Amino acid sequence: MANCQQYYFLLLSLAIFIPTLNANSLEKDEYWQSHVYEFDSYWQERAKAAKVDSQAAYFEDPYSVSSNFTSSVSE
């Protein structure tokens, strides 16, 4: 009887373990490149606008930003 329970446990373990081998398929770039046609053009435009805004907000000198922030808070 113990032998039969071990086989059931092994079968259950494999049934749980095998699907997890491909669990992170959404993190792969190939997945998103093959599904890019599903994205709405609205979101593509939003992504372009967000990229432009983030590049415009970038400061090359972090010390000037922090000193400006510090002086604004201390006033």
Image (cartoon, helix red, strand yellow):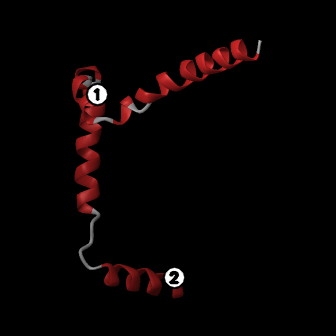
Q: Which of marks 1 and 2 is nearer the N terminus?
A: 1
Q: Nearer the viewer, residue 6 or 29?
A: 6
**Residue type indicated by callout 2:** Val
Quarter location, residue 30: top left
**Residue type indicated by callout 1:** Tyr
Is 21 placed left or right of 38 in the picture? right
**Circle 1 SS class:** helix
Q: Which of 14 and 36 is in front in this view?
A: 14
Checking the image for residue 73, the label placed there is 2
Q: Which residue was labeled with disc 1?
A: 31
Residue at x-position 32% and y-position 78%: 62
**Circle 2 SS class:** helix
Q: Residue 46: x, y in percent?
A: 29, 39
Q: How crowded is mark 2: few (under 14 residues within 10 Å), some or many (20 or more)?
A: few
Residue at x-position 52% and y-position 87%: 74
Q: Which of 11 and 48 is in front in this view?
A: 11
**Looking at the image, can residue 21 be seen?**
yes
Q: How crowded is mark 1: few (under 14 residues within 10 Å), some or many (20 or more)?
A: few
Is 70 placed left or right of 52 in the picture? right
Q: Residue 64: x, y in percent?
A: 32, 83
Q: Residue 53: x, y in percent?
A: 27, 54
Residue at x-position 70% and y-position 16%: 3
Is 22 placed left or right of 60 in the picture? right
